[in-house]
Image: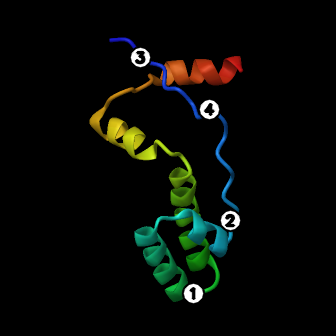
Amino acid sequence: MSAQAVEPFGCEPPEVPRTIGAISEALPDDLRRLFLEQVMTARQGPELDDVITAWWAQATLERDPDHARRLADAMAGRDRVPLAETLRRRSSG
């Protein structure tokens, strides 16, 4: 079995700042409601930090216009790149 190269974005998507407002704006409506509900009920400190970190990651994924297909492919085991190849690519540049 050979690995297929997965094409990266044509350009890097805009970075999502780690703020409640920016994360909220980057999320689709259904996820935004869940995010805001969790933000409003989290206690200041580690609990709120954890909520922001988790949702920031989701908001960043939402910036990839093809993220739904990529997620479906990953869940189905399609377009995998072996770890050795990933490490080789990282070390070469």
Question: Quick one: label 3 or label 1, which is nearer the N terminus?
Answer: 3
Question: Mark 3 to mark 4: distance in Å?
Answer: 21 Å
> Farthest residue toward the left?
76
> Farthest residue toward the top?
1
Question: Mark 4 to mark 2: distance in Å?
Answer: 24 Å
Question: Quick one: label 2 or label 1, which is nearer the N terminus?
Answer: 2
Residue depicted at x 57% and y 71%: 24
Question: Quick one: label 4 or label 2, which is nearer the N terminus?
Answer: 4
Q: Which quadrant would the N terminus be assigned to in this image? A: top left
- Tell me the residue that label 3 is attached to: 3
- Tell me the residue that label 4 is attached to: 10
Left or right, 45 with respect to 57, comes to right
Query: Which callout, 3 or 1, points to the residue nearer the camera?
Result: 3
Question: Mark 3 to mark 1: distance in Å?
Answer: 45 Å
Marker disc for residue 35? none
Name the amino acid type tagged 4.
Answer: Gly
Name the amino acid type tagged 2.
Answer: Arg
Quarter of the image where one finds residue 75: top left
- Tell me the residue that label 1 is attached to: 43
Marker disc for residue 18? 2
